[in-house]
Image (cartoon, rainbow, N blue to C red):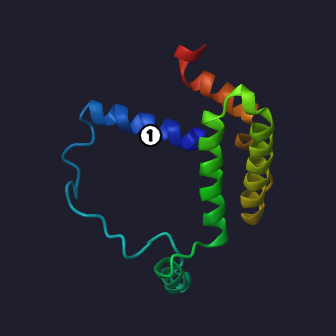
Amino acid sequence: MDLMEQIAEQRLQEAEARGELRGLAGEGAPLPLDEDPMMPEELRMAYRVLRNANCLPPELAQRQEIRRLEELLAHVDDAHTGARDEARRRLTALRVSVEARRGGTAPLWADPAYQERLARRMDPAKE
């Protein structure tokens, strides 16, 4: 889970604890997972076929690998510096690839040092 997802998850949990998410329209009803309203209509059928065949589009496969590498890096100790460095290089390359596919350049959040500074700034307890 990347930093922004962690922050969003934390904020959702805090709102839920305060009771701000109770009584909303559709509460308790199942989510309609058959259709993806954010997907352009002309791509929905192709993505449905891929999903039913257990095939992921390349960008989603890369995002899964990014999450796996982030999990690996969270649990690698200092005794495995070679594996950690290789995972970091692969993670950076994947992030750049995903961002390039979107037509942009590598985002600032791809820099681990920036992520750490942002995490400290967002969580005053870490300062």
Point out residue 15 in the picture as x, y percentages from the top left corner.
33, 35
Number of numbered callouts drawn: 1
- 95 relative position to 28: left or right: right
Quarter where residue 46 is shown: bottom right
Point out residue 44 in the picture as x, y percentages from the top left corner.
50, 81
Q: How crowded is mark 1: few (under 14 residues within 10 Å), some or many (20 or more)?
A: few
Q: Is residue 52 above or below residue 78?
A: below
Quarter where residue 57 is shown: bottom right
Point out residue 9 in the picture as x, y percentages from the top left corner.
44, 40
- 71 relative position to 36: left or right: right
Along the viewing direction, whichever of 21 and 95 lies nearer the viewer: 95
Question: Mark 1 = which residue?
Answer: 9
Rendered residue at 73%/35% (across/down):
112
Along the viewing direction, whichever of 42 and 72 lies nearer the viewer: 72
Q: Is residue 57 above or below residue 17?
A: below
Rendered residue at 27%/37% (across/down):
20
Q: Quadrant of the N terminus?
A: top right
Point out residue 17 in the picture as x, y percentages from the top left corner.
28, 31
- 47 relative position to 96: left or right: left
Along the viewing direction, whichever of 20 and 65 lies nearer the viewer: 65
Rendered residue at 80%/44% (across/down):
86
Along the viewing direction, whichever of 35 and 86 lies nearer the viewer: 86
Element type where label 1 sits in the image: helix
